[in-house]
Amino acid sequence: MLTKVLLDPSFRLIDTIFTDVDLQRIHAVADVVWGQDEPIPEDRLSAVAAELEIIVTGAWRHGHPSRFPQLRAILEIGGHLPPPADLDYAYCFSHGIRVLGCAPAFGPAVAELGLGLALASCRQIAWTDRAFRTGEPNWSHTSFATEIGDTFTLYGKQIGMIGFGGLARSLRPLLAPFGCPIQVYDPWLTETFLRGQGVAPVDLDAVLSTSRVIFVLATPTTANRALLTGDKLDLISADAVLVLLSRSHVVDFDALTERLLAGRFRAAVDVFPDEPIGTDHPIRRAEHAVLSSHRAGAISEGLHNVGRLVADDLEALCTGRVPQLMQVAQPEIIRLRD
């Protein structure tokens, strides 16, 4: 008998997540319930609750997991693990229910844009384009610097990473051709592990004060909300670039905006406290910032990568094997989630 799987992807759309091939793979190993873009109605869910073994969902809205006596795995496809306010993780952990997240699917695409944003800042690509279109002179044979500071190459520059999870590990090989030494602040990882990954473990102040390019890659938790306060941001050197990729949660965004408007350092920003950010938000006036509208991971290739990971791990679960690709919810991290 096939494993009964609830496919309830909303807010995601099935066609944007799954290719035809991956959907066929899922249907080959599972008895799929629902499988529509809209959330499953409560009466339909109640009718099959006793039989469901796996739930694939864009957001946990299915009530307490105890209502599913056969449940053994929850696979989220929204982009981050369900918040503890929505899902009782203690119950899941104590009852052997795996909670798996799709974040690793976005790692390569987000890392690629992160590299692009860093280069756009280091080499002043965005500023040069803007100046060219407005007719301001910035030809290399007449001016080698601007009010934003000198352009510089990424080759050999000290890289700092705040957080060394899946996103950082996708970014690291993209930086390898540039020969950049990498130092990392991640309080959840041991120094031995970090050194084994070929990076130098340092404290937060060292990352901020001694790195030429700083990537903010940390997963948001209650412990790192506004971790980069105004005082911490003041440690960044004037010729450095801050690349904000993971979540704006990690930064005091008002303090960051103030410093960018003052020209303290450069930054590239893909995530904001409110999205879409207001048209009157002052960061839009920051000449020292490259701004991206949270486009790092949610592209068609990245979304189809979600479907592939889900299909792979679902196939493993349905055939009595161990899932290998999705993010596993860890009790130590979940305790600090908002």
Image: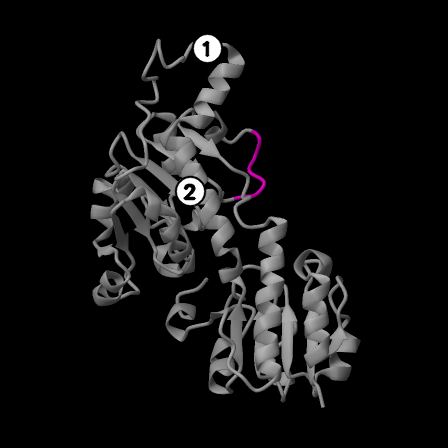
Q: Residues within 10 Å of mark 1 (few under 14, many from 20)?
A: few
Question: Dots 2 and 1: beta carbons under 8 Å?
Answer: no
Amino acid type indicated by mark 1:
Glu
Q: Please name the residue shown 40% across and 12% down the image.
A: 139
Residue 287: image x %, image y %?
A: 42, 24
Q: Which residue is mark 2?
A: 115
Mark 2 vs 1, N-terminal side: 2
The secondary structure type at the circle numbered 1 is: loop
The residue tagged 1 is 136
Give the residue at x 52% y 65%. Answer: 81
Is the residue marked by circle 2 packed among few (<14), some (14-19), or many (20+) residues within 10 Å? some
Query: What range of the chain is rendered magenta?
Result: 274-279
153 or 228: which is nearer to us? 153
318 left or right of 160? right
Q: Is residue 249 left or right of residue 198?
A: right
Gap between marks 2 and 1, in whole Å? 27 Å
| The N terminus, quarter of image | bottom right
- Left or right? Give the position of 110 relative to 189: right
